Image (cartoon, rainbow, N blue to C red):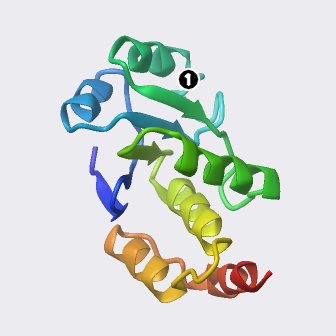
């Protein structure tokens, strides 16, 4: 599990196991957002074991399952609400971290005065290139 901070109070990582959640809690995270879909891979039949372990550790749990590259306005809104409403710091994850970083960038881009180059730079530093989404992110900021 490689954790990358994108902004103060928010980080992403790749696939998380129930045992990984112990480390997540030890590192001080208070909330976890899962962006994996039930049954998307053998290692992720659903989020029941993860959400149960999160509850045992006192972590807030939110599941916003999405298909890679296919994010509806409802998905982006749900992610934005999670960013605003969950206790921080928050850790979001999917299989590689890509969906988590995409949803974060789309949610943040809708806020007034969003610094799109800073979003792209933070994503790049975490190993994800969002340049292909630049025009969508910029359009959201103007919308």
Q: Is residue 104 visible?
A: yes
* x and y, in percent, of residue 120 in the image: 47, 81
- 45 w.r.t. 112: above or below: above
Q: Residue at x 72, y 53 (%)?
A: 77
* x and y, in percent, of residue 8 in the image: 33, 61
Q: Residue at x 24, y 37 (%)?
A: 28
Q: Is residue 107 left or right of residue 131?
A: right
In the image, 92 versus 129, the foreground residue is 92
User: In terms of image quadrants, where is residue 71?
Assistant: bottom right
User: In terms of image quadrants, where is residue 70?
Assistant: bottom right
Q: Quadrant of the N terminus?
A: top left
- 106 w.r.t. 57: above or below: below
Q: Quadrant of the C terminus?
A: bottom right
Q: Is residue 43 visible?
A: no
Q: Report which residue position mark 1 lands on.
A: 47
* x and y, in percent, of residue 108 in the image: 58, 68
Q: Residue at x 20, y 38 (%)?
A: 27
Q: Residue at x 40, y 44 (%)?
A: 91
* x and y, in percent, of residue 62 in the image: 57, 33
In the image, 76 versus 83, the foreground residue is 83
């Amino acid at each position: 599990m490689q954790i990358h901070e994108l902004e103060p109070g928010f980080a992403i990582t790749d696939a998380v196991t129930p045992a990984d959640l112990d480390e997540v809690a030890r590192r001080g995270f208070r909330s976890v957002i899962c962006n994996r879909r039930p049954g998307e891979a053998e290692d992720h039949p659903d989020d029941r074991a993860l959400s149960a372990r999160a509850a045992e550790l006192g972590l807030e749990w939110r599941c916003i399952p999405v298909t890679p590259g296919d994010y509806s306005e409802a998905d982006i809104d749900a992610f934005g609400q999670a960013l605003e409403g969950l206790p921080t710091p928050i850790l979001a994850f999917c299989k590689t971290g890509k969906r988590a970083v995409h949803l974060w960038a789309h949610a943040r881009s809708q806020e007034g005065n969003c610094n799109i180059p800073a979003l792209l730079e933070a994503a790049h530093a975490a190993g994800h290139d969002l340049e292909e989404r630049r025009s969508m992110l910029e359009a959201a900021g103007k919308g």
